[in-house]
Image (cartoon, rainbow, N blue to C red):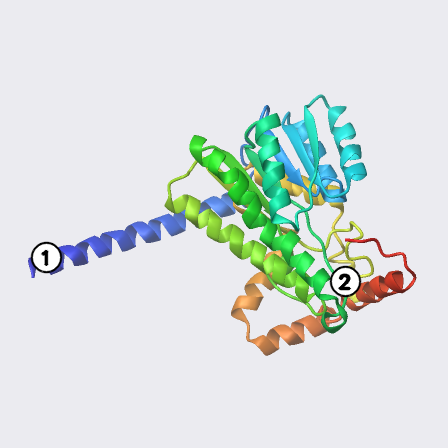
Amino acid sequence: MTRLNSITMIFILDLLLFLIDVTYSILCAVTRAFLHPRLKSVDGELCLITGAGGVLGRLFALEFAKEGAHLVLWDCNTGANEQTAELARELGVDVRTYTVDLSKRQNIYEAAERVRAEVGDVSILVNNAGVVAGRRLLDCPDELLERTLLVNCHALFWMTKAFLPQMKSRNHGHIVTIASALGLFTTACVEDYCASKFGAVGFHESLAHELRAENNDGIKTTLVCPYIVDTGMFAGCEIRKEIQSLIPPLEPLYTVQQSMKAILGEQEMVCIPRIMYIPFIARAVLPWEANVVTYRFMGGDRCMLPFIKNTETKTSNGHMKSP
């Protein structure tokens, strides 16, 4: 009986501590939302950015360069990657470029070995690269569906396996996953993209929990979930016109600057803009039919149809670039 009482008391104490921790965490999050948190320095850190030849990747490279981080830039497009490197070098940092196909696991592992041998240990990993098939599911070649999942999701596993061990050995590092609001809630006709980004969110959150459970408190993680960014990836996508002016596609520079604030402030997750937290919560709380009605009212159920049509037109005219 005494032992049972002791176990009960321990449970009650743990419950009280749990409630205190939850309250403290909420207060910290609210405070951080209204006050500017202290931003850490990344001067001299080695930062690897995937998809560095694209719009967001290039902006991330320049923002990290402004902070004094040395760069390792990966992209499958050698020319675009080199252009990003030239711009970053003008800011006075060391930059190395590598042509890497993230859909190929062995390509990632071999490039990672070269980086360690030629440059050193990566301390900031920004998983930014992303692709989308842009076709209706039943019309989409299997190879394009597979590529979306490989680049947007599977590559996160391989990148982490390649670079996390060195971070663990020093208990120092930062892993950033550029996911999407479409990894928190869905829309029609982009099954490949939504599935890959839901996978990215799940992978990132599980990894963050694992690092906490293993007391790797020196390794930080940041999950970035932006709304549609005006990079051309989803050209033509539009919601109801009356609402589109309230939630327009995001400017790439704004998206990256908000992401940088979260990364340097060691924020675990950020939705851009903040209004994206609402559909994320609504999806979990409201009945399925209520979410469907909301999507229809906002035009979210058909928002990707113009984008799909644009892609089909480019493909039929022979102007579609290989992914």
- Of all residues shown, which one is farthest toward the right? 317
- Marks 2,1: beta carbons within 8 A: no
Residue 275 placement (x, y as % from top left): 64, 56
Residue 144 against residue 255 in the figure, above or below: below
Rendered residue at 57%/66% (across/down): 282
Pick the residue in front: 9 or 236: 236
Q: Taking the image as drawn, is residue 129 in sight?
A: yes
Residue beneath the point at 20% across and 53% down: 10
Q: Mark 1 points at which residue?
A: 3
Per the image, the residue denoted by label 2 is 134
Residue type at mark 2 is Gly
Q: Residues within 10 Å of mark 2 (few under 14, many from 20)?
A: many
> At 69% from the left edge and 42% from the top edge, which residue is drawn?
100
Residue 153 figure quarter: bottom right
Looking at the image, is mark 2 or mark 1 nearer the viewer? 2
Placement of 67 over or under 285, stated as above or below:
above
Q: How far apart are marks 2 and 1 (CA)?
A: 62 Å
Residue at figure coordinates x 62%, y 43% from the top left = 108
Neighbourhood count class around disc 1 (C-alpha, 10 Å): few under 14, some 14–19, many 20 upward: few
Q: Which amino acid does label 1 sit on?
A: Arg
